[in-house]
Image (tube, helix red, strand yellow):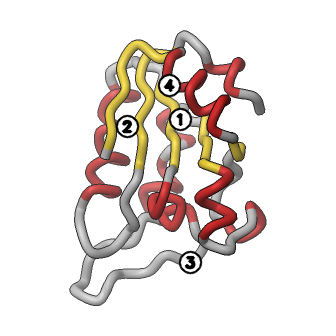
Amino acid sequence: MQAETVLNGDVLVILRHPPHGSSWLREGLDAALVAAAFGQTVSLLFQGDGVLGLLQGQGPGPLGQKGSSATLDMLAMYDIESLFLDARSLARLGLSTESLQLPASPLEPPSIAELIAGHRLVLTF
């Protein structure tokens, strides 16, 4: 999927933090679900350590923090199907798209800029 397919969307949520150590990723996913529940078209972009939130088999963190897998499973119920990730972050972390829980389209920086510019509202977590 190319960035052009979601241009002029309502809300883009950028997730830049790992699933454990803070609540940023969970709060970003929650914001996406709330926006979708109110009829907004929502896209997600996983950047930096946020890509780790897409890994299969997410369990609780060391302090009992919830993993992201249960929330990721709910995205389809809220019609959040436009998932993107920063291809450079994926490579930097030594991951492949096969290790992810959900399919997400890898984007290079120029396409990421187009994706961001094509949304009315951008939320960064």
If you read the primary sequence from the N terminus, does the residue marked by circle 1 or circle 4 appear first?
A: 1
Q: Residues within 10 Å of mark 3 (few under 14, many from 20)?
A: few
The residues bearing labels 3 and 4 have C-alpha atoms spaced at a distance of 29 Å
Q: What secondary structure is found at the residue carrying circle 1?
A: loop
Name the amino acid type tagged 1.
Ile
**Quadrant location of the N terminus?**
top right
Task: Please tell me which residue is depicted at 50% across the width and 39% down the height of the picture.
Answer: 44
Of circles 1 and 4, the one toward us is 4
Residue corresponding to mark 4: 116
If you read the primary sequence from the N terminus, does the residue marked by circle 2 or circle 3 appear first?
A: 2
Q: What secondary structure is found at the residue carrying circle 2?
A: helix
Residue corresponding to mark 3: 57
| Left or right: 33 in relation to 80 | left
Q: Residues within 10 Å of mark 2 (few under 14, many from 20)?
A: many
Asked whether the residues under the numbered discs 3 and 4 touch, taking CB atoms below 8 Å apart as contact, a structural biologist would say: no
Q: How many marks?
A: 4
Name the amino acid type tagged 4.
Ile
| Left or right: 96 in relation to 60 | right
